[in-house]
Amino acid sequence: MISFAEENYLKAIFKITEKDRKSAGTNAIAQILHTSAASVTDMIQRLSEKELVLYEKYKGASLSPTGNKIATDLIRKHRLWEVFLSDKLHFPWQKIHDIAEQMEHIKSDELIDKLDNYLGNPRFDPHGDPIPTKEGKFLIRNQYSLDLLNEGETGVLVGVRHHLTEFLNYLNELKIALGTELRVLKKLEFDKSTRVRINNNEEVIFPKKISRDLFVKKK
Amino acid sequence: MISFAEENYLKAIFKITEKDRKSAGTNAIAQILHTSAASVTDMIQRLSEKELVLYEKYKGASLSPTGNKIATDLIRKHRLWEVFLSDKLHFPWQKIHDIAEQMEHIKSDELIDKLDNYLGNPRFDPHGDPIPTKEGKFLIRNQYSLDLLNEGETGVLVGVRHHLTEFLNYLNELKIALGTELRVLKKLEFDKSTRVRINNNEEVIFPKKISRDLFVKKK
DNA sequence: ATTAAAATTTAGGTGAACCTAAAAATAAAT
DNA sequence: ATTTATTTTTAGGTTCACCTAAATTTTAAT
């Protein structure tokens, strides 16, 4: 039986390696899990023993097929619970992550099957992130970060790059949520900021930092 | 922050002392938690340090007011999740206990408030056990165990004494669930068994052991 | 009242998951 | 290429929650 701590390590390694990197460094893992590098080495060695992780000294860790399946299942559970919290219990999206972080560790395949069904087999979570299938496949959507749109183009928000509470609060205050229409009015060259109209209504200026973190589908 | 293990000890002590007993013995706790008596002594001493438990050497343990509140909250969470699993996800009642056992440890007051509301503020769980209020009050229902009814009397099943899987499976096979009408046809003196008609339909003979474990409301 | 039995605690030890400080290996900078 | 800086690992230690075996206390039985 795998522990919560072990599960969290697998998730962290998944997160680091999912984009491009082929292995996760000790420090990177330590940072995500708010622990020390020494503890990470310790745990990685145990996970390597159990063949959940591929590990070579000083070369970082990556997930074995088994480890990858466990991590994917965790993400599936996490995101399904986020949908539950958002759709059924009406939690605002800033609050769902921390609770889902606890719920993802509940062990019952039948529970997740029934939950998935109950929620109507959602394909994306309330942040716009894809929910992997039971078999571990991630749906890919062709989305753009807002800063890639040209002046005059309109996008519908389908996702955000990260889930920092302050960021989500900021969006909330601007009444921006998944499905919100964002029209690029003007791209200001000198500081890379973007003037945007929200749902044919108010206007805001997004610094580059923000517009890069908003994923939209062109309209 | 209280650990899962600590929470389980508080629940066990609650269970033992809730009826009459004023303190829980080491062995009794060990049996419930499938652990050794020595481990129990160990943990009780820590809980006593934290003032969650009142403890005197060789005299057993009981809950402090704080400990009692925590235990009651756990039972509230457990039973609310059981309602969720049963009502919303349509789990049969034999399966809900083990999953709820995991879910009860999730920490978020707001989650429980919203869940309670979402479920329609249920007062009893799918086994017929009362769900304590937020303030920790248990509703009492005047119920009788089936073996106390006289011949000719009818009761509606409102609860069961325990949740052993085999017992619940047995009831399931007989199509007995909460709300089922049970009419006492004959009480057999020589072995204390009871002949019962189920929902004006089939007849069964319950040994004393069974009829004592079924709680009904007289009709 | 002794003795026997049962319950409880103490003593000593284990593994998991963390820690700090020091050593070793790798990467970067001059 | 050598030094410096960064990353990673090792060494040694802690706490939590368990364990077995032995000692102690309480309870029950003769």
Image (cartoon, coloured by chain):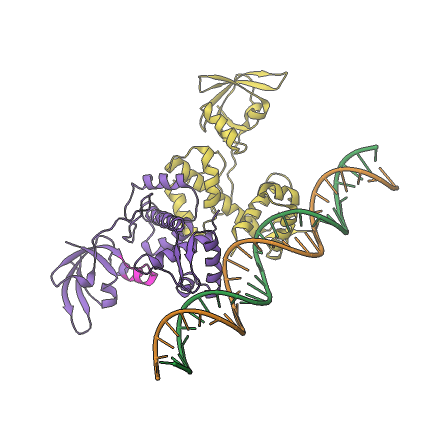
Chain colours: A yellow, B purple, C green, D orange
The answer to whether residue B36 is seen in the rendering is: no
Residue B104: image x %, image y %? Answer: 40, 49
Q: Which quadrant of the view contains residue C30?
A: top right
Q: Quadrant of residue A213?
A: top right
Q: Which of A216 and B65 is in front in this view?
A: B65
Considering only vertical position in the picture, is B1 above or below B185?
Answer: above
- In the image, A204: left or right of A23? left
Work out whether residue B44 or residue A91 is closer to the camera in this orientation and state it. B44
Q: In which quarter of the view is residue D2 placed?
A: top right
**Residue appearing at x 37%, y 37% in the figure:** A89
- Is residue A190 or residue A164 the one in the foreground? A164
Vertical side of B207 occupied by A145: above or below = above
Residue found at x 40% / y 41%:
B109
Where residue A51 appears, as percent x and y from the top left, is 60, 55
Is A151 situated above or below A30? above
- For the record, the magenta segment spans B160-170
- Exactly how many numbered labels are in the figure? 0
Rendering coords of residue B201 (x, y %)? 16, 59
- Residue B162 magenta-drawn? yes
Does residue A139 appear in the picture of this structure? yes
Image coords of residue A7 (percent x, y): 54, 49
Q: Front-most of A155 and C23?
A: C23
Which residue is located at x 47 percent, y 45 percent?
A: A102
Q: Indicate the quadrant containing the C terminus of chain B: top left, top right, bottom left or bottom right.
A: bottom left
Q: Indicate whether residue A145 is drawn in magenta.
A: no
